[in-house]
Amino acid sequence: MSELTLILDRRELAVGIENKTIRIDRPDSRPERVPLNMIERVIIYGSPMVSCKVWRALAEKNIPAVLLPARGNGSAAYLGTGLAPSFSNRINQYKTFHDQAKSLKIARWLITQKISGQESIINQLAVDNPAKNRLCELKIRLKKAVNRESIMGYEGVAAATYFKIWRKALPDKWKFSGRNRMPPKDPVNALLSYSYTIAGSDIRNSILINGLDPALGFLHVAQTGRESLVLDILEPIRPSLDDFVLQLISNTLNFKDFTTNMTDGCKLTKKGRIKFFKKWTIWNRKDCNTNLKISSNKIIKEVIAFSAYNSSLKF
């Protein structure tokens, strides 16, 4: 089964297809070949020369790709397969979106799952902090939320509470003072943003394979150029990714694995990215509960079942 993350991060690379393999040519060495059936995802930095045949082959194999700007400026671009030919799930998705009661129930459920995950992470941090009780209170209040704005408000309070505990728990050497991004200002925030971005590619692919419209979410408002359902499904998965980041800063990465400047903020070096993906492969292995494809598919299947049959939401 596919388990390899293929990273293309040099401008001088020429990438094409040769006998069901991806062929990578570079001026200073012999060509490298990677069988397509070994690749789980492709990540591209900057602007290597990638043949159209490569994109076609990746789409046919349902292999997601994420394109990241070389200097960290700008948004990531996700590529993958197109919408599944079956449209019944999309029809039910559209109907549920226009049913305020059902749409809000999904939104409340997604954030409740997220806060439950955050509570689990806080317990791991072993911090004696009254803020832990705050998260439990927010889950109770969520049950009475009557619109998306209220739900997102509770989510924002939960996130602020959660990362306040992180600030107290993490060693001072990481200089974590709270959640920030665009660009991230410290290694922990760089890892959080990076992990969420990579996860978004897998989630988007799962959404498309299941025949849903990635642009139409139940929690995040639909906006031009934003795939709101990807953000929806990401919410309850974030705590799992947060746990992965905590593992990285505990035993894998150090300050030498990051570079920081005023323009681009903080980001992983090339050596740091190698360490990141070695750990990611182990963490995201097929027999592990943290596997992104399995986790996102579970959430998506719950949403599909609720949209089609008004089933109870459980996870």
Image (cartoon, grey):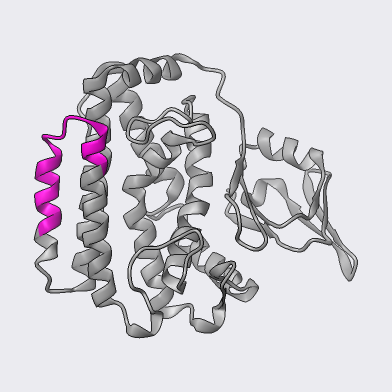
- Drawn side of residue 190 relative to residue 76, left or right: left
User: x and y percent of residue 248 in the render?
Assistant: 43, 72
User: x and y percent of residue 304 in the render?
Assistant: 35, 25
Q: Considering only vertical position in the picture, is 302 above or below 2?
A: above
At 28% from the left edge and 25% from the top edge, which residue is drawn?
103
At 18% from the left edge and 73% from the top edge, which residue is drawn?
126
The magenta stretch is: 134-152
Task: Please state the total of marks drawn on the protein image.
Answer: 0
User: x and y percent of residue 193 in the render?
Assistant: 46, 59
| Secondary structure character of the magenta stretch overall | helix
Q: Considering only vertical position in the picture, is 284 above or below 148?
A: below
At 26% from the left edge and 50% from the top edge, which residue is drawn?
156
Q: Confirm whether residue 131 shows in the render.
A: yes
Q: In which quarter of the image is the C terminus?
A: top left
65 within the magenta span: no
- Drawn side of residue 84 relative to residue 173, left or right: right
At 35% from the left edge and 49% from the top edge, which residue is drawn?
237
Q: Confirm whether residue 64 shows in the render.
A: no
- Drawn side of residue 22 relative to residue 233, left or right: right
136 within the magenta span: yes
Q: Quadrant of residue 309?
A: top left
User: x and y percent of residue 310 in the render?
Assistant: 24, 19
**Residue farthest toward the front in the current orientation of the protein:** 262
Q: In which quarter of the image is residue 232?
A: top left
Q: Considering only vertical position in the picture, is 272 above or below 150?
A: below
Which of the pair 288/292 is nearer the observer?
A: 292
